[in-house]
């Protein structure tokens, strides 16, 4: 296989896969459809697999095509990121840097960066939108938004900066007074600290059935992760929070882990940006944030 030519075919393959037809991709690229067909034929020949099922109704990706689309998209995004980061090194970080994220994440991991950031780059001004709502970086002219969980908006460029897991935990004092639940059903006999957002249970409802939820005693309903954590540290009850909130407390022994998250899943934490090019001001912010979080993250 000619690796260099193989790489040349990937951007064309992605355009055809995303638009679903040779004619639509040809219009976007300013090429003739027959030229795109030759590129795809060559790529399929080099790989030895069929990437599309072709019919008069259009193109459908095969299983191999779906796999290549996913992997190639990630690779091209990384290449764009590398190019943008290198270009940003020739600029001086300045102007207004606008970032949005969850309030607790911002207070815990973003605010501590600012003294160093501003000391190094005094021509920089930071605007933090600490909010529970899902902001739109394009519409709101943000440089980036930090979000948790898989992201479905394909128009944004994503950098995975960390991962999170959820932990059920309580203070040693609470456990001495009330014992540990042996299973989810025994939570009915305990005091629970719940996160409510827009009048909806946003934590326990992820793992408890509605009948069990109705039998549990929620002694505190709050829309702020920091307040939930503080209530748990004070011995008010059992909380269910991400490890970036309670991980350091569990490491210190001030909160003790209880039942494992029955979902057993790990979620990504992403920095989303509206533009492929990473500006100098965003580049230095991302570097400091990655350093602050650590690899692996400090809360794990």
Image (tube, grey):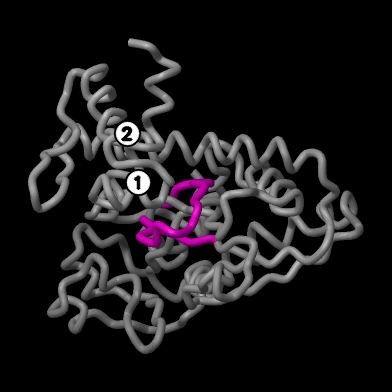
Residue 69 colored in magenta in the image: no
- Residue ID at (38%, 65%): 240
**Mark 2 and mark 1 in contact (Cβ < 8 Å)?**
yes
Q: Nearer the viewer, residue 117 or 41?
A: 41
Secondary element at tag 1? helix
> Percent from the top left, x then y, of residue 177?
38, 68
Can residue 122 be seen at all in this image of the molecule? yes
Q: Which residues are magenta?
A: 146-164
Which label is found at residue 35? 2
> Percent from the top left, x then y, of residue 127?
73, 71
Question: Image quarter for residue 40?
Answer: top left
Q: Nearer the viewer, residue 250 or 61?
A: 61
- Residue ID at (67%, 40%): 85
Secondary element at tag 2? helix
Residue 158 colored in magenta in the image: yes
Left or right of 102 on screen, residue 205:
left
Residue marked by disc 1: 26
């Amino acid at each position: 296989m000619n690796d260099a030519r193989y790489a040349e075919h990937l951007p064309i393959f992605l355009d055809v896969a995303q638009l679903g037809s040779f004619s639509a991709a040809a219009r976007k690229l300013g090429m003739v459809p027959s030229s795109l067909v030759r590129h795809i034929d060559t790529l399929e020949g080099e790989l030895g697999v069929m990437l599309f099922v072709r019919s008069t109704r259009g193109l459908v990706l095969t299983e191999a095509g779906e796999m290549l689309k996913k992997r190639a998209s990630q690779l091209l995004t990384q290449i764009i990121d590398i190019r943008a980061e290198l270009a940003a090194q020739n600029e001086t970080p300045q102007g207004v840097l606008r970032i949005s994220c969850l309030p607790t994440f911002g207070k815990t991991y973003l605010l501590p960066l600012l003294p160093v950031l501003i000391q190094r780059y005094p021509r920089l001004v930071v605007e933090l939108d600490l909010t529970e709502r899902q902001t739109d970086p394009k519409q709101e002219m943000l440089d980036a938004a930090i979000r948790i969980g898989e992201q479905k908006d394909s128009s944004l460029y994503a950098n995975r900066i960390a991962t999170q897991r959820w932990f059920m935990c309580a203070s040693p004092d609470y456990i001495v007074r009330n014992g540990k639940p042996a299973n989810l059903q025994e939570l009915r006999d305990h005091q629970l600290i719940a996160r409510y957002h827009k009048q909806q249970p946003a934590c326990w409802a992820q793992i408890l059935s509605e009948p069990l939820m109705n039998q549990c005693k929620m002694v505190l309903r709050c829309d702020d992760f920091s307040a939930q954590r503080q209530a748990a540290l004070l011995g008010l009850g059992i909380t269910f929070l991400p490890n970036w909130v309670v991980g350091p407390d569990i490491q210190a022994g001030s909160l003790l882990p209880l039942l494992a998250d029955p979902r057993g899943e790990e979620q990504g934490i992403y920095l989303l940006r509206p533009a492929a090019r990473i500006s100098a001001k965003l580049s230095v912010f991302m570097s400091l944030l990655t350093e602050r979080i650590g690899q692996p993250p400090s809360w794990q």
